[in-house]
Image: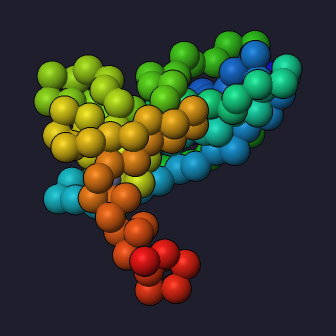
Amino acid sequence: MKALEVQINGERRCVAGDPKAFGFHFVLHAGIHGAAVLHLWGHLTPKKQGTADHATWLEQRVAQGETISLRMIETDEVDRPTDTHASTHARNTEGKLELSCSFCGTLKSEAKQLVAGANGNICEKCTALAHQIMVEKGLAK
Ligand SMILES: [Zn+2]
């Protein structure tokens, strides 16, 4: 199967792919909040009809000057994703996956209200913001 290999300074850090998936969209995201963190996740296209899923393969600190490279490869062995619900769940302070707002990432335990949907969740703050946008556009009172 086709997979995406991520190397840092020439060293293989992960091989992202899924034998059960027909295809992927990979997103390599580098966030800098103090330390720089590289984050690779994918949006899976299932072979059979059903809901698509998200999976995370890499969450890695990177330092200034390090070289990150991506390579498409053909392989039978891929790494198992670490998280499979990146858009609907986040890790709490104990490192456990918990339902979270798909818009702002607020955990269910930190939200006053989290409305859970089939493919996403929304908290009270984001609901209020979305309502405000609708009011400004004349689509709600
Ligand atoms: Zn929110």
Q: Residue at x 52, y 85 (%)?
A: 138
Q: Is residue 16 above or below residue 6?
A: above
In the picture provided, is 1 more to the left or to the right than 138? Answer: right
Residue 27 image point, x, y percent: 58, 49
Q: Is residue 63 above or below residue 23?
A: below
Task: Please name whichever residue, 94 or 105, is drawn nearer the observer in this view of the structure.
Answer: 105
Give the quadrant of the C terminus.
Answer: bottom left
**Occupied quadrant, residue 32:** bottom left
Task: Please name whichever residue, 6 or 105, is drawn nearer the observer in this view of the structure.
Answer: 105
Q: Residue at x 22, y 23 (%)?
A: 95
Q: Residue at x 57, y 37 (%)?
A: 119
Residue 37 visible from this viewpoint: no
Residue 135 image point, x, y percent: 44, 80
In the picture provided, is 28 more to the left or to the right than 109? Answer: right
Q: Residue at x 29, y 53 (%)?
A: 124
In the picture provided, is 14 more to the left or to the right than 3? Answer: left
The number of numbered discs placed on residues in the rendered structure image is 0
Residue 75 image point, x, y percent: 76, 20
Q: Is residue 112 above or below residue 33?
A: above
Task: Please name whichever residue, 79 or 8, is drawn nearer the observer in this view of the structure.
Answer: 79
Task: Please name whichever residue, 18 or 133, is drawn nearer the observer in this view of the structure.
Answer: 133
Give the quadrant of the N terminus.
Answer: top right
Colour scheme in use? rainbow
Residue 120 visible from this viewpoint: yes
**Occupied quadrant, residue 88:** top left
**Occupied quadrant, residue 103:** bottom left
Residue 94 image point, x, y percent: 15, 22
